[in-house]
Image (tube, grey):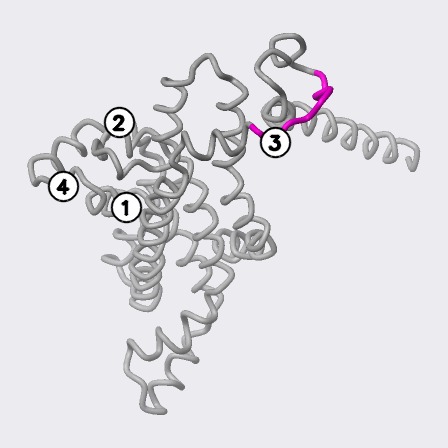
Amino acid sequence: MIAQNKAKTYGFILLGLLLSIIWFYPFYLVIVNSFKTKAEIFVNTLSFPSEGTLANYPEAFTALDFIQSFINSVIITVVSIFLICICTSMAAYALSRRQGKTSSVIYFIFAICMLIPFQSIMIPLVSIFGSFDMLNRAGLMIMYLGLGSSLAVFLYFGALRGIPKALDEAAIIDGCNRFQVYRYIILPMLKPTTVTVIVLNAIWFWNDYLLPSLVINKEGLYTIPLKMFYFFGEYSKQWHLALAALVIGIIPIIVVYMFLQKYIIKGISDGAVK
């Protein structure tokens, strides 16, 4: 029995290692080849660079117009996430504290919306926003608010189930109104869930190409994925610069994830299990 359990454990470890290698393989190719010259990439794509060079990164940084693209991505990502966290945490708080058929139906609608693929509503969504002259950065943020609300409400609602209503009642007895209860009692206790919502949506918004490509069409407002698309079109044969640009583009979101990763599992378990 013990030997059988050890065999299963080793089997799972081996399977995990194989899956990790498969998952990391594309990143290996991007990172390794970003330090090669153009000629060396075509000689051997898989090998380490014989003479590593950092010259690709300054060139890619300039050609990518990274500062402007970075600022655009940060503005869209930060504002969209702020709106999602505030609006959905308030909505989940109201739904969790006012139990009834209406609240249950509204929560059920939010939960069902997680199953609707974006591609199925893409054309009518862009058409409606275009009729209101909202195909701009502000319109994109509102779209993200609507598209990201279902999962956020689901997580917040689950987390609020673990916060007793007695805390609300005690705060109200002490003189707090509903907003003060939310602001000073509930919101701080939702920190792990909030961080989870931030990380999941930040990864999505930062890397999203499809929706910004439909909404933002003005030079100077391009996000990093959009600028990357045009960068590949302009430098399609200069893979050493293109791969360096890819590395530059993914660094910021990796840094954010590394700082916030300890909250992610707790936030997901609070939102989905309780």
Judged left or right of residue 190, residue 264 is right
Q: What residue type is labelled 2?
A: Ser
Judged left or right of residue 72, residue 18 is right
Q: What residue type is labelled 4?
A: Met
Where residue 4 appears, as percent x and y from the top left, is: 88, 31
| Residue occupied by mark 4 | 134
* Residue at mark 1 to residue at mark 4: CA–CA distance: 25 Å
Q: Element under label 1? A: helix
Q: Element under label 3? A: loop
* Residue at mark 1 to residue at mark 2: CA–CA distance: 17 Å
Q: What residue type is labelled 1?
A: Ile
Where residue 72 appears, as percent x and y from the top left, is: 32, 44
| Residue occupied by mark 3 | 54
Please say if the residues under marks 2 and 4 sit with CB atoms less than 8 Å apart. Answer: no
- The residue shown at (37%, 83%) is 169
Pointer 1 local density, CA inside 10 Å: few below 14, some 14–19, many at least 20: few
Q: Tell which circle, 1 or 3, labels the residue nearer the N-terminal end.
A: 3
Checking the image for residue 235, the label placed there is none
- Prevalent SS, magenta region: loop
| Residue occupied by mark 2 | 120
Q: Tell which circle, 1 or 2, labels the residue nearer the N-terminal end.
A: 1
Q: What residue type is labelled 3?
A: Leu
